[in-house]
Amino acid sequence: MGRRIEYAAVARGAVVLAEHGDNAATNAGAVARQVLDRLPAAAAAAAGGDCNVSYTQEQDLRVFHVKRTDGVTAICLADHAAGRRIPFAFLEEIHGRFVKAYGRAALTSLAYAMNDEFSRVLSQQMDYYSNDPNADRISRMRGEMDQVRTVMIDNIDKVLERGDRLELLVDKTETMQGNTMRFKRQARRFRNTVWWRNVKLT
């Protein structure tokens, strides 16, 4: 699976309010807390304390992606192959859901206060963004464009096939018209021949 999100958390500063991680990401929580501790210095440089940053783990091909807005931080650990677009789309979704569910309470809550409820949301969204091709808007749009292209090619093939059938039908019609004219001439000759025989007999 090339684009897995293995760990996710929502925090206020360095205080983790909810988290969820796969079994493979055993030390992800501890490393995430270290990243959160270092984040204020990076966030101070950004206007208003809001930021979107990524930190690469040196020992493997995994990257921590962080989105901080209005004092609430969403963080995730993803495979390097996931790039930035999918993890940040995931973080945007998680941040929006968390703020909608808990609002201002997130600014005063104790550590892990929302973990029981929100860890399920994290788990579901991690699975969706890790496995569903529709999670990535660009991939989804490429898929839709491929479907449209396939439909257009099928329609063009049908039109060409219909055109070929029309040409065949026109050819057969012309052949039938030629046969009809020959039949009329032969019928007229036969009728004339029969009429002359009848005239001679009388």
Image: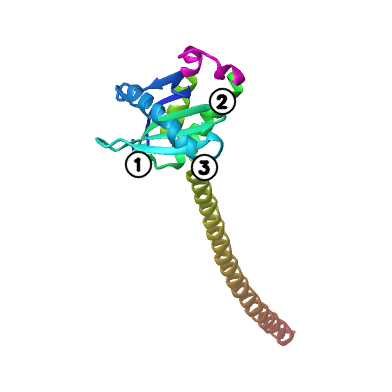
Residue in view at x 35 percent, y 41 percent: 81
Q: Position of residue 104 (x, y in %)?
A: 61, 20
N-terminal of the pair, mark 1 or mark 3, is 1
* Residue 137: image tag: 3
Q: Residues within 10 Å of mark 1 (few under 14, many from 20)?
A: few
Q: Mark 3 belongs to which amino acid?
A: Arg
Residue in view at x 55 percent, y 23 percent: 98
Residue in view at x 61 percent, y 23 percent: 100
Left of 34 or right of it: where is 152? right
Query: In whole angstroms, how far apart are the C-alphas of marks 1 and 2?
Result: 25 Å
Residue in view at x 38 percent, y 24 percent: 33
* Residue 52: image tag: none
| Badge 2 vs badge 3, beta-carbon distance below 8 Å | no
Secondary structure, mark 2, is helix
Q: Mark 2 belongs to which amino acid?
A: Arg
Q: Is residue 165 magenta?
A: no
Q: Which residues are magenta?
A: 103-119
Q: Is residue 88 above or below residue 193?
A: above
Please name the residue that numbered disc 1 is placed on. Answer: 81
N-terminal of the pair, mark 2 or mark 3, is 2
Left of 23 or right of it: where is 99? right
Q: Nearer the viewer, residue 88 or 37?
A: 37
Q: Mark 1 belongs to which amino acid?
A: Ala
